[in-house]
Image (cartoon, rainbow, N blue to C red):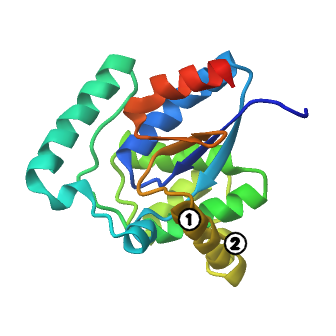
Amino acid sequence: MMGAKKVEFLFDYGSPASYLAYKLLPAIAERHGAEIVWTPILLGGLFKIVGNRPPAEVPAKGRWMLQDLIRHAAYYQVPFAFNRFFPVNTLMLMRGAVVAQREGRLLPYSDAVFKALWVDGRNMNDPDIVAKVWAGAGFDPAALFAAANEGGAKDGLRHLTEAAAERGVFGAPTFFVGDAMFFGQDRLDFVDRELAVA
């Protein structure tokens, strides 16, 4: 539909804040009749481009963030357990997302990967565990690994990440409603308000 409301969601599975936003954004979008534009990016690559650092590299900030994520999840009643294998190298997971999106299966893929990381506490640095998670979501792990290692998936993820940096994105989750940018799962109220007037 021409002129339909849209909210773009830029995310990386290794970001627990992205997981919380992933669980909460659909209800907000539905309330406003808005389409969610799902945009996987590679957070590590983005940090290198823009010169940002993970919160965990600042011990005091990392400790605060963990408690804040737990509070946020409890307040919104989202299942959440901080993954003891954090940080996770999400390169293969995010390339897999590009492949799943091209196949029209990004949501079942994302459901499985986010749950494995931030509910079940799986070690998604382990390719064997990744394969089991993918298989459980209905994917052929061998085929998905092969596709994720092809140039199209690599170039696609690189393009999405570089394009995000060019738009001023510096972390995940980030949201766009039109030209308005919002950062962090704790800014979903602002996304809600922006959609109300979009």
Query: Which one is nearer the viewer's eye here, 110 or 72?
Result: 72
Q: Does residue 105 show up? A: yes
Placement of 170 over or under 45, stated as above or below: above
Whole-Å distance between the Cαs marked 1 and 2? 32 Å
Q: Percent from the top left, x then y, of residue 31?
A: 66, 16
Q: Return the residue at label 1.
A: 166
**Residue 185 quadrant:** top left
Q: Residue at x 34, y 70 (%)?
A: 51
Placement of 115 over or under 104, stated as above or below: above
Residue type at numbered disc 1: Glu
Q: Return the residue at label 2.
A: 143
Q: Residue at x 56, y 60 (%)?
A: 164
Q: Residue at x 40, y 55 (%)?
A: 14
Q: Percent from the top left, x then y, of residue 132?
A: 52, 59
Number of marks drawn: 2
Query: Taking 137 as reference, is 86 left or right?
Result: left
Q: Residue furthest right?
A: 1
**Residue 16 quadrant:** top left
Which part of the image, by quadrant, shows the N terminus?
top right
